[in-house]
Every structure is written in structure tokens, then in C-alpha cells.
Amino acid sequence: MLSSKIFSELLSSKGFNFYSGVPCSLLSGLIRILDDDPQTPYYPAVREDAAVGLCAGAYLAGKLPVLLMQNSGLGYCLNAFTSLNLIYKIPVLVVMSWRGEDGKDAPEHIIMGEINQQLLQTAGMEYSVISADNYEESLDKALQKIKEGLPYTLLVGKGFFDEGH
Amino acid sequence: MKGTEAFEEIIPLLTDEPVIHANGFICRESFNLKDREGNFYMIGSMGLASSIGLGVAVSRPDQKTIIIDGDGNVLMSMGTLAMIAAAAPRNLLHIVIDNEVYESTGRQGTLSSSVALDDVAKSVGYTHTKRVTEKEQIKSAYQELIGKEGPSLLLIKVEPSFDKATGRVHHTPEEITSRFMKALG
């Protein structure tokens, strides 16, 4: 399990300085740390696509944004990713929790848990499934894509971060 | 008043403000009347002009920021009004050109003939809201709101009047991004 504190410090050290999203219990520790620290402004969004818009505006104004969300919000974001981020070359780092991984979760998460990678691939959204072994390397890859103007998703399974509730 | 007339009143009042435009006739009318590098033309992602504008405003608190939105866009993302009110950027003016229809898709009705969007903004916590129905009122309403601490909302009620012959935005989305970021500095 990775400490949310260490991950948030890693994000800051890489230059990320704007955060928005819709909570997931898997990301609760990370959101709490970001929310508590004035150096890492976190703007709660009402829905995931509104967070995509907010992060896009922040990027246009010179920030390096991170969007935190559960995979259940992916459907809401597909139009924004495809008709805003991808065509305007507006990057964002998406930290997306993977509910329903391996078919083990509450019923509402099972289908999205099975198809979220296919949806990302179909939409042309590059991503990595992060683990204790590859998260630093995955973040470096994300940064490279962000420099090219592309959004990049880190898909995070249950138990990767310490939870804050 | 016609939608075009509302733009004809607003555009001369703009100075160096970044202006985020909602998709549809909002982008096209504004582009055709006067293109500006500081205009962000959101050609897709309906409903997100307000959240993009909020992202710009909170990231540049010393820069007056303007959103030119439409009633269909606002209704699609009504929750974003709450985000704007909660974040409370003093430098944000949210203009809504309200023609009560989805104009560019054939004038299907939105809900704003029976839902007062200025009242919604006031209820969620915008600091100032104003509604105008005559083009002669736009200049003074704009100047009053731009001089106050926001977030403020200016609702301009117009008739559907979009001419289909009005061209689309010529710039590519990538060009829109780079010129807007350059203009914002």
C-alpha cells in the first residue's frame, strides 16, 4: 500500500498544482491530504465532466491539473475527453479508481469495472494500471504525454492507496 | 432584441479579458463579429464553458474573466453554477445569452422560458445578478457588474435569430488553445 502523502508529494514535486474531482473511497486519503494543504488547492466538482472542464480552464491559465475520480464517472467524461481535451491538446492527469476490478465489488461497479480499459482505449485515452512497482515510471510516462498536450490516466485498484475514512 | 445585437453591444466593451464561449451560435456569432486571441471558442463539450471559465478565473485571480454562455449550456450543467458560487471567484462575470431554444440545432425549446436562470444563480450564491431585455440596457448592466466583486451573472433575454449562413470558427482547436494561452500570458 502506498502512502497518499508520499503520492501527493510526488505529484507536487512533478509540478502538478491544481486538483479537482469527485470522491471515491479508494482515493479518500489522497483527497483529504490535498484538501488539507493550501499548497494543493482541491476544487470539489459536482460531476466528473465538470471537473474535466475546470481542469481544462486551469491548464489554459498555466496550471498543471490533476482530476481525481471513480471509474463510474468515465461515461460522463467521454464527450469532454474527445471533444475538448484530445482535439484542443489540453492535457490533464486523471487518477481514476478502478471499482469492480476482477468482477469483485458491489453490483453497480461490475460492468464498468470490466469495460473501463476498453472504453479508454476506444476513446484514444492513454493510461497505465499502476502498482507499487510501476507508479513512478507510470507518472513519468504520464508527464511525457502531458508535455505532448495529451491527457493521461492512472488507473488505481483497491488497496493501492491508504484510505482516509 | 436579436442575439446578434447582444453581441454587438458586448464586444466593444471587452478589453483584455479572456472570454470563454459556449458552443453553437455563441461561438459562431462572436467569431464572425470580431475574432480575438483571448477568445476561447468551445466548439464541442456542451455544458462546460462555465467550468472552463471557472478554472481560468480561479487560476488568475487578478484577471477579470468572462464566460459567454447559452441557456441550453447552463441548463445542462446547472451544478456548475453551484461550483462557481462555492469557489466564489471575485473576478468572474458569467454572461448568459438566453434565447430559450437550442438555436443551432433547429430551435427546439430549452426550459428557460419557465426557469429563471438569474434566480437560480442568485439562489446558489452568485454575488450579483442582473437581467436585461433591451439592448440599450446591456452596456450599463455590463459596466456595473464588471466593476463589482463577483461571481456575477448577466442574463440577456434575446429572440432566436441565428442565421444559418453564419460561418463556423475557422481556427483549429489546437490553434484556439495556443492563441488563447498566449493572449492570457
Image: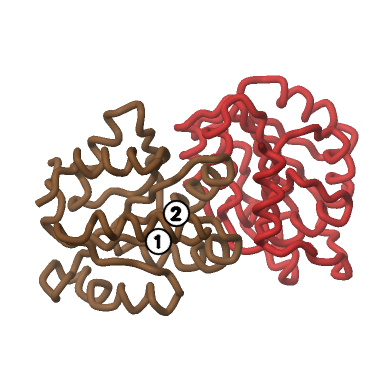
Q: Pointers 2 and 1 in contact (CB under 8 A)?
A: yes
Chain of the residue displaying label 2: A
Disc 2 target residue: A92
Name the spot of residue B157 as percent of width and height, x first: 76, 45
Place of residue A100 in the rendered image (x, y in percent of width and height, measured from the top left): 18, 69
Residue beneath the point at 60% across and 50% down: B49
Q: Which chain shows up in red?
A: B
- Under circle 1, the secondary element is strand
Secondary element at tag 2:
loop
Looking at the image, is mark 2 or mark 1 earlier in the sequence? 2
* Residue underneath mark 1: A152
Chain identifier for the brown-coloured part of the image: A
User: How many marks are shown on the rendered structure?
Assistant: 2
Report the amino acid beneath label 2. Answer: Val
Which residue is more in the foreground, B31 or B110? B31
The quadrant in which residue A18 appears is: top left
